[in-house]
Amino acid sequence: MTRLGELDFPDRVSPALPAWAAQLLFAAICTLLPIVLRWAVDLFAFAADPFSLIYLGVLVATLFGRWQCGLLTLAASTLYAWYFVLPESRSFAFEIEGDGAKTVVNVLTLLGIVFLSEIFRRVARNAAAECSRQIADRELLLTEFDHRVRNNFANVTALLQLQLQRADNDVARDMLQAAIGRVEGIAQANRYLFIAGAGERICAHDYLNELCAALTEALFAGSPIELECDTAAEMISSDKAATIGLVVNELVTNAAKHAFPDGKSGRITVEFTRSEDCCRLAVADDGVGINGSKRPGSLGHRLMDALVQQLEGTLETRTGPDGTRVTLVFPAD
């Protein structure tokens, strides 16, 4: 219905039919349908106005077939009503005094309908064309904006990696590595937000798999640690994607820093499932576990608390000598 104002029958059937043939065909349809309706009406209201249903046919013909089609429908319908419906039937003679004047008035009214309908049709099509042009311009600007944002993220990541190579102590390297991961997570979320649009829904499986691939390249290149992503093909709100991506980044980075000391090998798994009323995100490792209630890193802890609060969720940590599992549960949207 939203595109009804743009419907043009000659354009729709082109190039199968030339414009003139399409207009003749559509005029025939718009003439025959009122005749059929006229026949149905005559079954219970024979004395009804013979021209009443012609108005509808001429209006439809002009709006969706152009003014030429409207005039063809007007001529054919008027001649039919004049010859077959008005007394005297099967004759162009007028049996009832005043039918001639009535016919002239109806024809002039129909001409007015064709004129006004054609104006409306052109205004509607021009408005639709302008709207389409503005949408195309907007999409072009958004594409250019997205391209520049991606370049900016790439530049920031490159600068952080350059600083990481020059860092001369473990604390600085850890902080820079965490920053790189956070930038990668935000960049990945930004890409999906651009594709889906705010308020839309995206596939958690595709999103988290691509995010894990980016984290693997940023954190585990040449490392004996493996990062696996085991997620269901559930749909999540794109508005929550950035927050979920940052949570995954923080938990994976934390596990990479503390679960496998002294270059130990191991596996980190990201899991995502959804039930009817809640979503469950879990990051598990098979490392050495946590000594104490929390792993170090106050900035990361404060960030995690803010992210969990933003999702209106709860965070549970289970740890032991066989590894650590952190589970985030938050309401499904």
Image (tube, grey):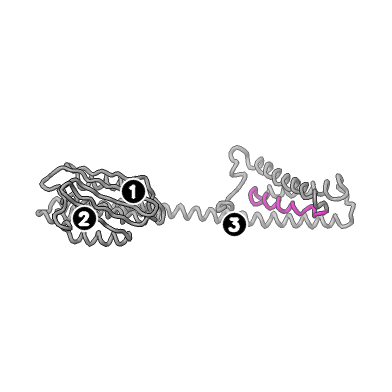
Q: Which residues are magenta?
A: 47-67
Viewer-nearest residue: 309 or 79: 309
Q: Which residue is mark 3?
A: 123
Q: Residue at x 55, y 56 (%)?
A: 127
N-terminal of the two: label 3 or label 1? 3
What is the crowding at mark 1: few (fewer than 14 residues within 10 Å), some, or many (at least 20)? some
Instruction: Assess whether mark 2 and mark 1 are in contact (beta carbons under 8 angstroms).
Output: no
Q: Position of residue 324 (x, y in %)?
A: 20, 50
Three-letter residue code for mark 3: Val
Using the numbered discs, state the Cα–Cα distance from disc 2 to disc 3 in whole angstroms.
Answer: 54 Å
Three-letter residue code for mark 2: Ala
Using the numbered discs, state the Cα–Cα distance from disc 3 to disc 1 in whole angstroms.
Answer: 51 Å
Quadrant housing residue 277: bottom left
| Quarter that holds the C terminus | bottom left
Q: Is residue 50 magenta?
A: yes
Q: Is 249 placed left or right of 258 in the picture?
A: right
Q: Which mark is residue 273?
A: 1
Considering only vertical position in the picture, is 226 above or below 298?
above
Q: Residue at x 31, y 48 (%)?
A: 272
* Magenta stretch prevailing secondary structure: helix
Three-letter residue code for mark 1: Thr
N-terminal of the two: label 1 or label 2? 2
The answer to whether residue 156 of the structure is visible from this angle is no
Q: Is 4 placed left or right of 276 in the picture?
A: right
The kind of secondary structure element at disc 1 is strand
What is the crowding at mark 2: few (fewer than 14 residues within 10 Å), some, or many (at least 20)? some
Q: Which mark is residue 179?
A: 2
Q: Position of residue 94 (x, y in %)?
A: 88, 51
Viewer-nearest residue: 265 or 41: 265
The kind of secondary structure element at disc 2 is helix
